[in-house]
């Protein structure tokens, strides 16, 4: 996000921000991947329960 701010580019899309919020609430670290701008996001955790919570909440929010 800081890179996008410095470059004047919207690298972190609204969808990425929504997923990041879900991640913060479930113990999963979320980052954009690929070229940024909404193409893909990845979540990282070493806690299987956190991964399940994140997946369930992301699906409920309309993410696949």
Image (cartoon, grey):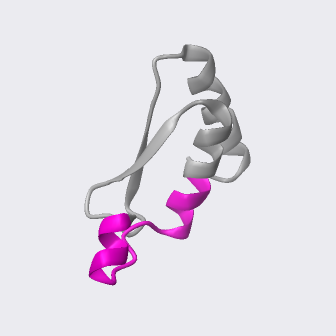
User: Horizontally, is 58 left or right of 1 in the view?
Assistant: right
Q: Nearer the viewer, residue 2 or 35?
A: 2
User: Horizontally, is 52 left or right of 39 in the view?
Assistant: right
- What residue appears at the point 40 percent right and 77 percent down from the top-left corner? 10
**Majority secondary structure of the magenta segment?**
helix
- Image location (x, y in percent) of residue 57: 70, 40
Q: Nearer the viewer, residue 6 or 39?
A: 6
Vertical position of residue 26 compared to residue 23: above or below: above
Vertical position of residue 19 compared to residue 7: above or below: above
Q: Nearer the viewer, residue 25 or 41?
A: 25
Vertical position of residue 14 compared to residue 58: above or below: below
User: Horizontally, is 23 left or right of 43 in the view?
Assistant: right
- Image location (x, y in percent) of residue 25: 68, 38
Q: Nearer the viewer, residue 21 or 62?
A: 21
The quadrant of the image that shows the N terminus is bottom left
* Outermost residue to the right: 60
Looking at the rendering, the stretch of residues picked out in magenta corresponds to: 2-19
- Image location (x, y in percent) of residue 64: 55, 47
User: Horizontally, is 43 left or right of 58 in the view?
Assistant: left
């Amino acid at each position: 996000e800081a890179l996008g701010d410095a470059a004047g580019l919207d690298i972190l899309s609204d969808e990425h921000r929504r997923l990041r919020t879900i991640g913060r609430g479930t113990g999963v670290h979320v980052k954009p991947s690929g070229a940024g701008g909404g193409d893909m996001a990845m979540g990282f955790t070493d806690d299987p329960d956190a991964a399940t919570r994140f997946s369930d909440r992301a699906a409920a929010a309309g993410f696949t």
